[in-house]
Each structure stands twice: as structure tokens, then as C-alpha cells.
Image (cartoon, helix red, strand yellow):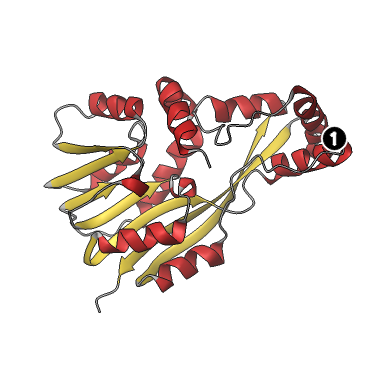
Amino acid sequence: MNKGLIRDNFDKYAVNYDSEAKIQRDIASELITLLPDRPYKNILEIGVGTGFFTEELLKKNEFSDFTANDVSVNMIETHKNKFFGRKIKYLTGNFEEAAIDNKYELIAGSAVFQWFTDLNLEIKRINKFLNINGDLLFSIFTEGTFYELDESFRKSYEELALPYRRRILNFYNFDEITGFLKNNDFDVIKISEKKIVINFDNPLIFLHSIRDIGAASFDSEKVGTVVMRKMIKNYKKLFLNKAGTIPATYNVLYCLARKKND
């Protein structure tokens, strides 16, 4: 996973994010329903983007210390403008490399943890940054997300006698995520998984919807024209529905976990 490329793409498309990232907004609205009715004075939000989930958190909390992190400078600037006048500290850069010397009552991240190189390691790190009985609230895209796209690429590489190259993220599954939490001294308080299917007029419109929020590229090797044309043809052949549209599946896991009081 090319983290520099991910950062650059989110920088490039930050201006589009509010208007194009509809599913991310919906996920933020769903995730906040898991938040307990308790005050959190010290909050760290990872991958704030332009602030969909920040808005939800601020409605629920009167905090004294709120730290907002994002890998993208342009996302951070948009966030600063949106929440001008609020006492928010900013931590710009890749969370996986961030030096954090504070403790929090709540650490949260909506639709961002799938970008971690090693989710188990980051959950272990997050535990260290939480107070005893501190909460971790997050949503993450899980296994099965974009399976239609992956299958269309897989068939295309096969038909072109080319070695398969994965063009979507390696998503974790439900059991893996719950295992990471339990192995790193978290009690799982609430957890659920939801399938969301969005229909698009054609595969290109679907791909553009991903590109236009900066989430399309994580691999520096671009898809060749021949492969792309074959993939589009196969996507329609395999998944075109009766309405004449093609589906794109998003599997989303929502979780509230609490640091154990050992």
C-alpha cells in the first residue's frame, strides 16, 4: 500500500469530498448511534477528513481537549475552516507514524481503519493511548467490499493470460477484527456489520465516484487500457441487473470497544 500516493490523492480531491462522499456521511451518522451517553473530555479522532464524524461528535460532547488527525494537509485545512473558532488541536500526518504523548477517554475513526497497514498493530497502539475504561469507536470497510470489482478484474486477467493483480484493498473480516480487539485488551461492547449496495449506471461512474473522493489509488502501478476495457466489459457481463445498472457492495463494520480495567 503506497501511503504517499494515498495522501496525495486525498489532497487532490479534498475539494470534492463534502459533495461526493455520500456513503461516508451516512456511515458517520450510523456510527454515532453506538456512542454511549457519557461525557468525554479528551477525544482523538483519526482520519477526520472534512469533518463528517467530527460534526456528530461535537453534537454529543462538551470536550476540553479534541485532537483531529488526518494524513491530508488539504483535508485538515478544510476541517479547520469548517470548525473555525472551535478549540481543536490538529495532528497532520499518517497516524501510524504519529508520536502521541497524551491519553484520551475516546479515540474514534469513521471509515478510515481499512487504510492501516497492520490493523492489529494499530489497535494495540490505540490501547496505549486510552485511559483505563476509555472507549474506541470506529467503522471500517470489511471483506466483501467491492467484490464485484475484484471479480471483474480477476476474470479479465485470466482471459488476457496475465497474472492476477489485486486492485482493491485487502479488507479484514468480522472475526479478524474482533480477534484483534480481544487480543489487545479490549472488551467489545457493541458490534455489527451491514451490507450497503449502491447501483450505478455503469462501471466507469462507479470508479469515478471512488476517484472523486481520493480513495481510488493506493497502488502506484496503473491499470493498463486493455485490462480496464476488459474489466468494464466483464463487470457488465457478470453483474448487470434487470434495471440495467451495476451494483457496488460496501460491507461496513461498526464497533464500540472499551479498554479493559486490569
Vertical order, 215 against 41 (above or below)? above
Q: In the image, what residue type sits under mark 1?
A: Lys
Vertical order, 9 against 169 (above or below)? above
Residue at left offset 18%, top offset 57%: 103
Residue at left offset 44%, top offset 22%: 12
Residue at the far bottom in the pictured view: 262
Dot 1, how many residues are within 10 Å of its Cα: few (below 14), some (14-19), or many (20+)?
few
Q: Position of residue 189 (x, y in %)?
A: 37, 68
Q: Please indicate, yes or no, whether residue 157 appears anywhere in the rendered image.
A: yes
Q: Position of residue 257 (x, y in %)?
A: 36, 64
Residue at left offset 39%, top offset 57%: 122
Residue at the far left in the pictured view: 64
Please, what secondary structure does the residue beneath circle 1 have? helix
Q: Position of residue 48 (x, y in %)?
A: 34, 38
| Residue at the disc numbered 1 | 237
Relative to 37, 46 lies left or right: right
- Picture quarter containing residue 83? top left
- Picture quarter containing residue 262? bottom left
Q: How many dots with numbers?
A: 1
Vertical order, 47 against 192 (above or below)? above
Q: Nearer the viewer, residue 231 or 235?
A: 231
Q: Position of residue 243 (x, y in %)?
A: 77, 32
- Picture quarter containing residue 46? top left
Vertical order, 120 against 63 (above or below)? below
Q: Nearer the viewer, residue 116 or 78?
A: 116
Q: Nearer the viewer, residue 160 or 236?
A: 160
Q: Please indicate, yes or no, whether residue 46 appears anywhere in the rendered image.
A: no
